[in-house]
């Protein structure tokens, strides 16, 4: 996090911190739906593009209301990541006036050089279900999830696969949930990737 002006007294700053404008701690990565792909089994719909009357056209992955559906994506975290748990927020919409909730779950697995890609995901963590506003194509943003433990003993220079799902047993939106993307929160313990 960068500070404008004086940093809080509880955070000691070094000359390097001040010069770079960056302090180690909580960071984010945005992963849009266009960087994801439906699972081969029980996958969500393929990427969809919707032209609205005004403003941006949206690209979404649409998840059905009747059964759990899945999509995947991958991230190579910076070396400054502390290899600990992560959290997430899902950004989504619905072309519906229904005010039901949608629940998103995330699981991950980290793979090292020469590691087998045929490795199971860790435990799925489901964020608190978020109610749709009742206005078609309104933006919905979930609360930050609980801690997601990434399987595979994460370390530096690893490729981390994620699986996102709509958990219909934990929600009641009577329409497709249209995933726009996911914000990942992770913690760094270094100022750079040197």
Image (cartoon, rainbow, N blue to C red):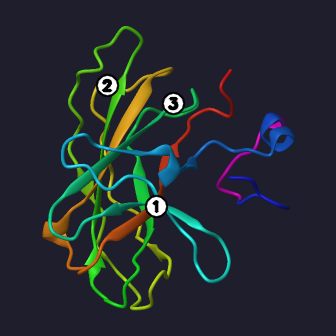
Q: How far apart are labels 3 and 1 at the CA level? A: 23 Å
> What residue do we see at 39% from left, 91% from top?
134
Task: Give me the disc on residue 60.
Answer: 1
The location of residue 31, given as percent across then percent down, is 52, 49
Q: Which residues are magenta?
A: 9-15
In this figure, which residue is indicated by the disc labeled 2? 153
Q: Is residue 80 left or right of residue 107?
A: right
> What residue do we see at 68% from left, 34% from top?
191
Specify the principal SS of the magenta part: loop
Q: Which of marks 2 and 1 precedes in the sequence?
A: 1
Q: How far apart are labels 3 and 2 at the CA level? A: 14 Å
Q: Is residue 75 highlighted in magenta? A: no
Task: Give me the disc on residue 139.
Answer: none
Q: Is residue 91 left or right of residue 125?
A: right
Choose mark 3 or mark 2, whichever is in front.
3
Count of labels in the image: 3
Position of the C terminus, as image quadrant, is top right
The location of residue 136, given as percent across then percent down, is 44, 86
Q: How far apart are labels 1 and 2 at the CA level? A: 31 Å
Callout 1 secondary element: strand
The location of residue 34, given as percent across then percent down, is 51, 49
Callout 3 secondary element: loop
Callout 2 secondary element: loop
Q: Is residue 68 left or right of residue 26?
A: left
Choose mark 1 or mark 2, whichever is in front.
1
Please determine whether, in this image, residue 60 is positioned above or below residue 13. below
Marks 1,2: beta carbons within 8 A: no
Can see residue 32? Answer: no
In this figure, which residue is indicated by the disc labeled 3? 76
């Amino acid at each position: 996090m960068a500070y404008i002006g004086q940093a809080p007294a509880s955070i000691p700053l070094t000359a390097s911190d001040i010069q770079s404008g960056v302090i180690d701690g909580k960071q984010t990565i945005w992963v849009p739906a266009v960087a994801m792909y439906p699972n081969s089994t029980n996958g969500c719909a393929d990427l969809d593009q919707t032209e609205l009357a005004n403003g941006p056209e949206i690209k979404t992955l649409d998840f059905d209301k009747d059964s759990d559906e899945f999509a995947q994506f991958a991230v190579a975290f910076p070396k400054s990541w502390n290899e600990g748990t992560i959290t997430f927020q899902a950004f989504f919409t619905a072309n519906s006036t229904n005010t039901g909730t949608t629940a998103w779950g995330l699981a991950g697995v980290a793979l090292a050089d020469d590691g087998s890609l045929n490795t199971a995901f860790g435990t799925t963590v489901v964020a608190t279900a978020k109610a749709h506003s009742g206005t078609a194509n309104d933006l919905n943003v979930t609360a930050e999830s609980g801690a997601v433990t990434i399987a595979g003993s994460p370390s530096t220079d690893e490729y981390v696969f994620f699986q996102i799902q709509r958990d219909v047993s934990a929600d009641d939106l009577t329409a497709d949930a249209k995933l726009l993307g996911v914000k990942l929160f992770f913690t760094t313990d270094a100022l750079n990737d040197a």
